[in-house]
Image: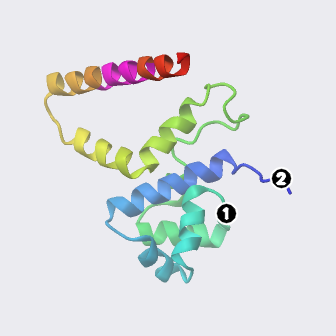
């Protein structure tokens, strides 16, 4: 049996739900309770592995205090995954959906000094470059 990849739109909507839920300080269990589903089901919705029906999507939006359309905001145009963007959109979604990415985004948004923000970006780029060089050296061994 072949596993299918989640639809990019389902993944995007799920990541928007996760981000909004976390911003509200709500657990997956609490959201699931209000929806009448298990926290495992909420996890599947957030990962995009299970599609969300229209009425359930409307309930989620109401619980999270947003319009349904807000959950689609920023979705990439419907194209074949990883074709036009080289996987960049999926990478960004994965970052902001991760615990570390979410925490990094929150902390970064609280920094008001533009010079400090630029230094942090430069540091991140430098660390990424050093990490990639180290991986390349390891591959050569």
Q: Residues within 10 Å of mark 1 (few under 14, many from 20)?
A: some
Q: Secondary structure at mark 1?
A: loop
Q: Which residues are magenta?
A: 124-132
| Front one among 63 and 36 | 36
| Front one among 10 and 137 | 137
Left or right position of 57 against 102? right
- Can residue 6 be found in the magenta stretch? no
For the N terminus, the quadrant is bottom right
In this view, 99 is above or below 127: below
Image spot of residue 121 (x, y percent)? 28, 24
Among the two numbered marks 1 and 2 on one chain, the one whose residue lies closer to the N terminus:
2
Q: CA distance from mark 1 to mark 2?
A: 16 Å
Picture residue at 68% right of the left edge, 62% below the top: 51
Q: Can you identify the residue that label 2 sits on?
A: 2
Q: Indicate the quadrant where residue 23 lies.
A: bottom left
In this view, 20 is above or below 36: above
Q: Residues within 10 Å of mark 2 (few under 14, many from 20)?
A: few
Q: Can you identify the residue that label 1 sits on?
A: 50
Residue occupying the far front of the picture: 141
């Amino acid at each position: 049996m072949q596993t299918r990849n989640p639809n990019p739109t389902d993944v995007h909507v799920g990541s928007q739900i996760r981000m909004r839920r976390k911003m509200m300080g709500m657990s997956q269990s609490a959201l699931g309770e209000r929806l009448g589903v298990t926290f495992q089901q909420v996890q599947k919705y957030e990962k995009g592995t299970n599609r969300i029906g229209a009425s359930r999507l409307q309930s989620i939006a109401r619980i999270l205090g947003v319009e349904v359309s807000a959950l689609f905001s920023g979705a990439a145009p419907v194209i074949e995954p990883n074709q036009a963007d080289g996987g960049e959109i999926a990478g960004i979604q994965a970052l902001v959906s991760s615990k570390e990415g979410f925490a990094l985004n929150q902390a970064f948004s609280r920094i008001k000094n533009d010079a400090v923000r630029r230094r942090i970006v430069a540091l991140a780029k430098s660390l990424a470059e050093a990490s990639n060089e180290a991986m390349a050296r390891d591959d050569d061994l």
